[in-house]
């Protein structure tokens, strides 16, 4: 299954922004819905509480007004007051019905029903009293006494409404706590999902950029063999293809340069050989005797011819290492024995300067060209001897790690400056420390060593160290 690939890097960024924003937008929408529900419930609770409180107070006011009208009717006997009592009964029924609609408690409903029944019986009694004045007054006093019970019920209804309002507030607070916990868990989950999406898109965005950066670094290091492959948005893939084309083009130019340098170096050897032979004839006085000053001039000429010949041979070796992908004449041999042989070759210069060499070599066999690998370790040890001060210390360690063998060569010299570390393997490069040494080099030793090691499928690195230079050579163990 082939995953969708955006057409451009901008499209990938936009898609990442949208996908990362979706959980956050969902959390925001969910929070708004929860808050809206709480606001609506709070509004309903507030309005119903206000209605119940105002209804309770209105009920008490109507009962008080009805009682006053009934007592005036008793004293004055005016029929208008009885009409007012009957009119207030209708208002009381509406108020009781409204309170019953707002009610959710059975006890409160029973109290409302009791008030309605008692008040209806009281008004009906006033309307149907008969007999003489004394009997009528006695019946009216008995009926009016029921208003005390009605007032007590009205106060009880108000207290019940307050209790019901308190319960609703408690229920609202409980829902607030529940919604708060749910909102926290929901928001936390969505934020975690957003973080995971951010990590995913950071990987998707950084991967092609990192591939391009690594490809450019390899080109800067002169690695024209490793292909540059960029996966991701199509515009970055096209950029990777252009970088790979540039790599192939640089490889072609590098091969052309190597061929040109090799050709020039080869052509220089013929006239140089003639000059060296002529200097040898003069030195041996085969063409006639020379005085002391002439012999000194011929000696200088012969010495510089030898230096120039060595430089040309190093250039030819470097070019041969560059154009050869695998070492010729491969065989299997003991690497520890080869390194010990190199150490023996440098015994004279080491003893003359009282330099100590600590050697720890694990027995291991490698496959490759013995001459080339000997050149590698000879160059490393030569540099170590060159830069180590008199009575200094050089350490050589050979370790076996899984299917790889690692050799460390460390000296106690001044080390390599930070600004020179990235260029130590460049051809003809010599750092500030090389300019202070008596023995001058061509600047090709480490470059040749790098090419030879890479031809064997290994690596050579300059490691950080507190003092001196520390190199590590990694090679595959012979199977």
Image: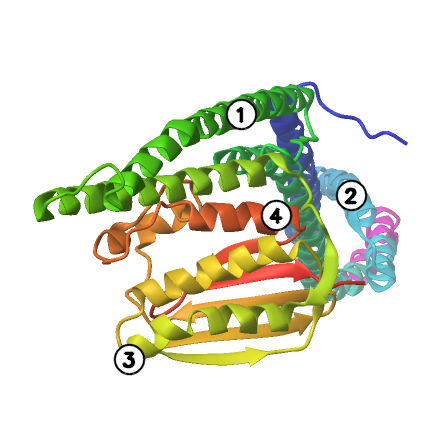
Q: Nearer the viewer, mark 1 or mark 4?
A: 1
Under tag 1, what secondary structure?
helix
Instruction: Name the residue tied to disc 1.
Output: 259
Magenta range is 118-137
Evaluate if marks 1 and 4 touch, with contact meaning CB atoms under 8 Å apart: no
Q: Which mark is residue 454?
A: 4
Closest to the observer: 354 or 291? 291
Under tag 4, what secondary structure?
helix
Residue 128 is covered by the magenta coloring: yes
> For mark 3, does the 10 Å Cα neighbourhood hold few (<14), some (14 to 19), or many (20 or more) residues?
few
Q: Quadrant of the N terminus?
A: top right
Under tag 3, what secondary structure?
loop
Main secondary structure type of the part rendered in magenta: helix
Q: Which mark is residue 278?
A: none
Residue appearing at x 42%, y 70% in the figure = 346
Q: Which mark is residue 98?
A: 2
Q: Nearer the viewer, mark 2 or mark 4?
A: 4
Q: Nearer the viewer, mark 2 or mark 1?
A: 1
Give the CA separation, mark 2 to mark 4.
96 Å
Residue appearing at x 70%, y 41% in the figure = 30
Residue 414 is covered by the magenta coloring: no
Q: Is residue 25 visible?
A: no
Kindly indicate the quadrant of the structure image that contains residue 94: top right
Q: Is residue 209 above or below residue 290?
A: above
Instruction: Name the residue tied to disc 3.
Output: 391
Residue 244 x, y percent position in the rendering: 63, 25
Residue 299 x, y percent position in the rendering: 21, 47
Q: Is residue 257 visible?
A: yes
Q: Quadrant of the C terminus?
A: bottom right
Evaluate if marks 2 and 1 touch, with contact meaning CB atoms under 8 Å apart: no
């Amino acid at each position: 299954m082939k995953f969708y690939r955006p057409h451009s890097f901008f499209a990938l960024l936009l898609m990442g922004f949208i996908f990362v924003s979706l959980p956050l937008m969902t959390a925001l929408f969910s929070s708004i819905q929860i808050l809206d529900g709480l606001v609506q419930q709070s509004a309903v609770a507030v309005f119903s509480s206000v209605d119940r409180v105002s209804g309770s107070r209105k009920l008490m006011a109507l009962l008080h007004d009805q009682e006053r009208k009934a007592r005036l009717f008793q004293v004055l006997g005016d029929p208008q007051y009885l009409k007012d009592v009957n009119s207030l009964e209708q208002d009381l029924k509406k108020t009781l019905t409204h309170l019953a609609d707002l009610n959710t408690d059975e006890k409160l409903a029973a109290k409302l029903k009791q008030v309605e029944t008692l008040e209806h019986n009281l008004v009906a009694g006033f309307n149907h009293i008969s007999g003489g004045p004394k009997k009528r007054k006695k019946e009216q006093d008995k009926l009016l006494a029921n208003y005390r019970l009605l007032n007590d019920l009205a106060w009880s209804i108000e207290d019940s409404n307050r209790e019901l309002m308190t319960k609703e507030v408690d229920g609202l607070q409980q829902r607030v706590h529940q919604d708060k916990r749910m909102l926290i868990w929901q928001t936390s989950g969505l934020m975690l999902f957003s973080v995971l999406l951010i990590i995913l898109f950071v990987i998707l965005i950084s991967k092609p950029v990192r591939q391009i950066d690594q490809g450019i670094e390899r080109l800067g290091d002169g690695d024209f063999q490793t292909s540059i492959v960029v996966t991701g948005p199509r515009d970055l893939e096209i950029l990777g293809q252009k970088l790979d084309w540039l790599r192939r083009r640089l490889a072609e130019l590098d091969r052309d340069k190597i061929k040109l340098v090799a050709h020039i170096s080869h052509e220089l050897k013929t006239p140089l050989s003639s000059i060296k032979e002529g200097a040898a004839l003069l030195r041996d006085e085969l063409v006639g005797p020379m005085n002391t000053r002439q012999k000194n001039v011929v000696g200088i000429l012969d010495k510089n011819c030898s230096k120039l010949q060595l430089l040309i041979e190093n250039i030819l070796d470097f070019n041969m290492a560059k154009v050869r992908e695998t070492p010729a004449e491969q065989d299997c041999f003991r690497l520890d024995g080869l390194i010990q042989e190199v150490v023996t070759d440098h015994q004279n210069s080491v003893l003359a300067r009282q330099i100590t060499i600590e050697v720890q070599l694990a027995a291991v066999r490698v496959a490759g060209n013995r001459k080339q690998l000997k050149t590698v370790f000879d160059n490393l040890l030569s540099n170590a001897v060159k830069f180590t001060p008199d009575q200094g210390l050089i350490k050589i360690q050979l370790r076996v790690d899984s299917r790889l063998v690692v050799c460390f060569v460390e000296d106690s010299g001044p080390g390599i400056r930070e600004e020179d570390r990235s260029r130590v393997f460049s051809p003809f490069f010599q750092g500030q420390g090389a300019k202070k040494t008596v023995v001058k080099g061509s600047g090709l030793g480490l470059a040749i060593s790098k090419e030879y090691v890479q031809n064997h499928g290994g690596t050579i690195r300059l490691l950080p160290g507190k003092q001196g230079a520390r190199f590590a050579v990694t090679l595959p163990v012979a199977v």
